[in-house]
Amino acid sequence: MAVEKFKVEASHIMMFARAVGDANRIYHDEDYAEGTEPGSIIAPPTFAQASAQFDPDYSLRPPIDGDGWFGSGGKPSGAKPREGSGGGGGGGGGGLHAEQRFVYHRHIRPGDVLTATNKPGNTWERESRRAGKLTFSESVTEYRDQNGELVITATGVGVRTERPVDQG
Amino acid sequence: MALNASELNAGDTYTERLVEDLKRTQIVMYAGASGDYNPVHTDEVFTTEVAGYPSVFAHGMLTMGLTGKMLTNYVGDGRLTEFGVRFTNQVFPGDTLDATATVVGVEDGIVELNVATVNQKGVQVAMGTAKARVD
């Protein structure tokens, strides 16, 4: 995803670390973090994914007024996921996350102001017994800091399934 | 805290329990923190009636984030240089996950690891590789 300004804040790192069940104090305790090798709070290794919060048009966040959102209210809304969103997979008409890779040039810290630029990578297809035709598409996101230095290179692969993945 | 190259051998393993009986609320927390509000992760009505899955399921990135905790506990804070996984099966509420890092080798101060996360049925849900700086 492309993001112009991803301001990294300590409270966001704390919440993200909680969400991935990581109690490591380096993610929330400044005093403790000072005494560690990194010397400050850093972000957990998958934190860059939270840049979605800073993409004004992120398709997997309901619009402020909720209008057109494909999730349910009292009943299914009947709306379709926007093109390019992960969507529901199979019957939901969208896709799933197939693969994710990160290369760390350094680790993210509070105070960083990152930009993310995105370019599409390869696409390919495969037949699957459990979900029919699979269409994979790769995208490469470069996260750069306030000095223009490359911080993280993230490669994501999404997959659209012909039908919901059989759990049998 | 960091690993020492001289003490690492190919085939060494490190395993951690990532989560036991994964709670739906944990998935909600991940949605809120990451900003990925895809309804297949939190909206049971959409997921069962429209998307066609038996229940909501975890973000692949929650599985990867949980797996990352095992890795950073093993290699030390700020030591990872690469981390990648494929999501090979979905993770559902109630799942218990264990992750294992296996040393492939050490070269030029970098340890290469295979990474695998399995559920309570022994089914692999994520597999991949990681690299980290060692002393």
Image: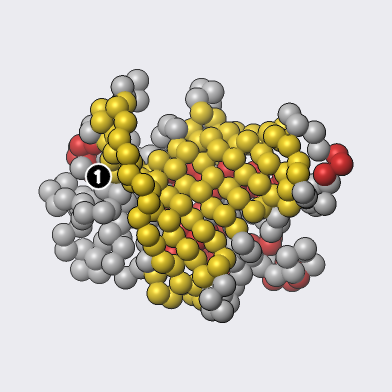
Along the viewing direction, whichever of A44 and B11 lies nearer the viewer: B11
- Residue at 51 percent across and 70 percent down: it is A144
Q: Is residue B95 visible?
A: no
Q: What element carries label 1?
A: loop
- Measured as percent of width and height from the top left, residue B102 is found at 68, 33
Local crowd at mark 1 within 10 Å, few (<14), some, or many (≥20)? many
Along the viewing direction, whichever of A49 and B94 lies nearer the viewer: A49
Quadrant position of residue B16: top right
Quadrant position of residue A68: bottom left
**Colour mapping used in the image:** secondary structure
Along the viewing direction, whichever of B58 and A1 lies nearer the viewer: A1
- Measured as percent of width and height from the top left, residue B40 is found at 31, 44
Q: Can residue B8 be seen in this view?
A: yes
What type is the residue that disc 1 sits on? Gly
| Residue found farthest to the bottom | A147
Quadrant position of residue B59: top left
Q: In this view, does A84 lie above or below A107?
A: above
| Residue found farthest to the left | A78
- Measured as percent of width and height from the top left, residue A158 is found at 35, 45
- Measured as percent of width and height from the top left, residue A75 is found at 16, 47
- Residue at 63 percent across and 36 percent down: it is B114
| Dot 1: chain letter | A
- Residue at 57 percent across and 66 percent down: it is A151
Left or right: B84, with B8 as reference point: left
Q: In this view, does A7 lie above or below A141?
A: below
- Residue at 54 percent across and 45 percent down: it is B84
Residue assigned mark 1:
A94
Please tell me how many numbered marks the rendered image carries: 1
| Residue found farthest to the right | B6
